[in-house]
Amino acid sequence: MSTIKRIAQKAGVSATTVANVLHGNTAKVSPATREKVQAIIDEEKYAPNMGAIILAHSNSRIIGVIMFMEPRRDETVLEDPFSSAILGAMEREIRDNGYFLMLHTTSDEDEVVRLSKAWKLDGLVLVWVPGDICRVISGSIDTPLVYIDCYFTDDERVYYNVGLEDQRGGYEIARYLLSMGHTDIAFLANNPQFYGGDPARCEGCRQALRERGLSLTDDRYIPLPKDRRERETLYRRLVDDQFPYTALVFSADYYAAEAVSFLQDCAVEVPSRISVTGFDDNIFARLVRPRLTTVHQDSGEKGRLAISMLMKLIRQEPVPEANVRLPVRLEIRDSVRRIRQD
């Protein structure tokens, strides 16, 4: 097994120089020496001891990522391409900056606060955390902190956040449905217990309907169960004759694609019997048949931008914009039918 001493002998330098290269302390190491030592480290496939790295830097070199969501009961969080795309982009950026990623998922508000305070981290990313918890965490830890897809309940402090034009996305999808003759619309999403992306998307739908003198009443914001079988029961019930809906607007492609597949298996044709739309434009939207009309967002860019922002905070560099909202666009495909001419 390779050691720092062996690498130093092969490079003709001191063990201290090798350690400095490993730990990034290269201010006094010439570029030529650094490249030579790094080449031998790679050749030897040397794996540094994490404990030694932490001691050498007086920090952990670890970036924590906490995803605040209750996992679906029969799937893991990362089975959703949206979650894995964000996480994959963050991991690559974290690794390229010489750090390591620690991931945790939870729907326990107290656990988010506790872990944020207890972990020895160089930086922290919190994803989909309710605004009240954001306020508590930001007021109680000194760790550089960036949020993703969070909405905040106070103006007392600066929150570094990378989000989305959620309301705009909901508005665009509803306006398109209206242009196709749909006025009887249901919005399906996670339980709206706190304000965030899903309620903002629903508000966008409401805005588009209000402009036409219509409304999306509270009973048409339908929470989706965590259990898949319960969701399938709901999908089947929503296309029964007792419900007037001509279009189901889902807050995520994951659920929209699941509903389309299930309804097709039940001989309920999409879109001839009911139209379905999604949000995200992930791989499910393109693989399901009919292909989903949806709202496109660049989830990978969201993850990359969050880590770029976090690295600036760690290095105490200025961040040009604290609360970024990435743009969206409508992707029109095959899952919506025209029911009358305007």
Image (spheres, helix red, strand yellow):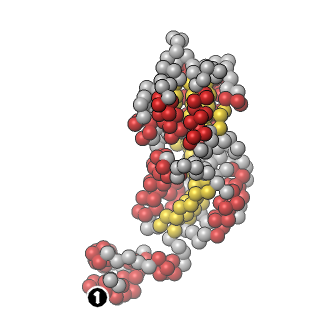
Residue 248, given in percent of the width and then of the height, sits at 57, 28
Dot 1 lies on which element?
helix
Give the labeled residue for mark 1: 9
Question: Is 83 situated above or below 6?
Answer: above
Residue 331 point in image, percent of width and height: 45, 31
Q: Quadrant of the N terminus?
A: bottom left
Q: Which of 163 and 158 is in front in this view?
A: 163
Side of 250 relative to 79 (left or right):
right
Residue placed most toward the observer, 30 or 330 = 330
Which residue in the rendered view is the most extreme toward the top? 341
- For the question of whether residue 332 can be seen, the reply is no
Q: Classify mark 1: residues with Cα within 10 Å, few (<14), some (14-19) or many (20+).
A: few
The residue depicted at 70 percent of the width and 60 percent of the height is 110
Residue at (49% x, 47% y) in the render? 80
Q: Which residue is drawn at 42% across and 41% down?
A: 283
Q: Which amino acid does label 1 sit on?
A: Gln
Q: Which residue is drawn at 58% across and 57% down?
A: 105
